[in-house]
Image (tube, rainbow, N blue to C red):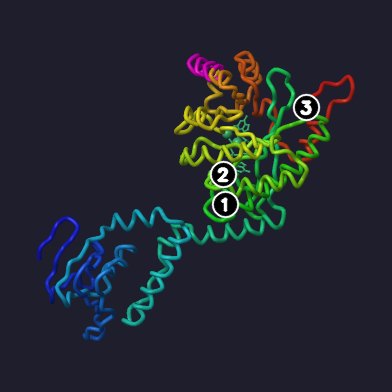
Amino acid sequence: MSSDSYQISKPAGEVIFREGDPADCAYVIEQGHVQVTVNRDDEQVVLSDLGPGEILGEMAVIDQYSRTATATVIEDCVLTLVTPEQIRQRIDQSDAVVRSLLDILLTRYRSELSLEQGLPMEAESVFLKQSGGIEKIRFENDLRRGLDNGEINVVYQPINCLRSGMTSGLEALVRWDHPTQGTIPPERLITLAEETDLIVPLSLYVFRAAVADFAEFRAVAQRDLFASVNVSPKHTVDSEFLNRAWDICTQAGGRPDQIMLELTESVMVDIQQLTSWVRTAKAMGFRISVDDFGTGYASLEYLTRLEPHTVKIDQDFIRPVTSDPRHAAVMRKVIEMARELDVLVIAEGVEAPEHVRVLADMGCDMAQGYAVGRPLTRSRAAEFLAPAPAGGRSRG
Ligand code: C2E
Ligand code: CA
Ligand code: CA
């Protein structure tokens, strides 16, 4: 037998592995033939004859069992080694549902094999329980139903101009009131939806709700207001979402320039692709905001290449602005830089009145956060935006 780090040669007659051996790797047959057999009542029963291009020994590597068959070279072989790490890495990167399905198939196959050999049935795999795939399928069906049954709601958080104190726009934030699990955090909901096709209907649902609700908000407030809508990075790979969003907006009598599409900076995407997407969005009339600015991989690139209308500075950066002079200095410079680039700055997660004052003094354009207003249901947002009766103080 000759070998190098990833390929081995084995002569006819040699056993590659035996039933009961620990599984240290799988093999791809490059040349030659291998016979896979099992021992039944002291007789070797042939399970398969494998040739070039076929893989063997992968099953025990995937589920980390010992070998349940014996592989013997029947014609001189050259084999490429596949390490458990190579396989495990691919499996770990795959979708939880795919992992569960793989595990179900393997457990079932092993049970049948045990039954045939008169051995006890395989217990339900631990891996199946750990991977959460079944729970995910359930959750996915729940979400499908939730979209049909009106369990998905959109709330609106005011974004105020720091000079006038007036509300300039509101951010649409999705909520899911699950019938048995209560309110599902949007991060969990979005992550699940992004892993499935459901992100498209979910995003369009939020978009449609925002377009309709803003028509009411503008009528109530008797002035223009921009609608900020979060866009999943999944939608920025083609113009499908943009086309659908444009249709929804214009068919409802809205204008795309009243809509701010928020693109998070915290998820790594192909900047070239994103730049071209942003160009299309702008040509359609949409406004662009860079969300979570300062938390991502490419803040300055986003600012220069995407030429956004606004940047939203993440709350983790805003919080220390009143207590830490270095944060304050950076914030001042970001505002200065944005002004030079004709980009408006929104401070996010502004929780204390003192922050509102300090940010206004720094020349920050807008603020969003509990100190300005919490996310509000549609009806509460409409109440919030209604001009105060004559003599009263207007909030909107
Ligand atoms: P985000 O876009 O950064 O939204 C701001 C989040 O900060 C919201 O959380 C909001 O409720 C919260 N927040 C606002 N003011 C304050 C404050 O003063 N203090 C603190 N501690 N938090 C504040 P929410 O609604 O839980 O949303 C979380 C994230 O989920 C959003 O972060 C956004 O990334 C995502 N998300 C929400 N709705 C949608 C949606 O419709 N589509 C997509 N793609 N993502 C969404
Ligand atoms: Ca956002
Ligand atoms: Ca944000």
**Callout 1: SS:** helix
Residue 186: image x %, image y %?
Answer: 60, 44
Q: CA distance from mark 2 to mark 3?
A: 29 Å
Name the residue at the right extreme.
390
Instruction: Look at label 1 and name its amino acid.
Output: Ala
- Residue position for label 3: 396
Q: Is disc 3 surrounded by few (<14), some (14 to 19) or many (20+) residues within 10 Å?
A: many
Could you tell me which quadrant the C terminus lies in?
top right
Q: Nearer the viewer, mark 2 or mark 1?
A: 2
Left or right of 70 on screen, residue 334? right
Is 308 located above or below residue 184 in the figure? above
Residue 2 picture quarter? bottom left
At 73% across and 44% down in the image, what residue appears?
250
Residue 141 x/y as whole percent: 60, 60
Magenta: main secondary structure equals helix
The image shows residue 333 at horizontal and vertical percentages of 52, 16
Pointer 2 or 1: first along the chain: 1
Query: Which contiguous range is marked in magenta?
Result: 322-336
336 or 104: nearer the viewer: 336
The residue identified by callout 1 is: 193
Indicate the quadrant where residue 224 lies: top right
Type of amino acid under label 2: Ser
Magenta stretch containing residue 61, yes or no? no
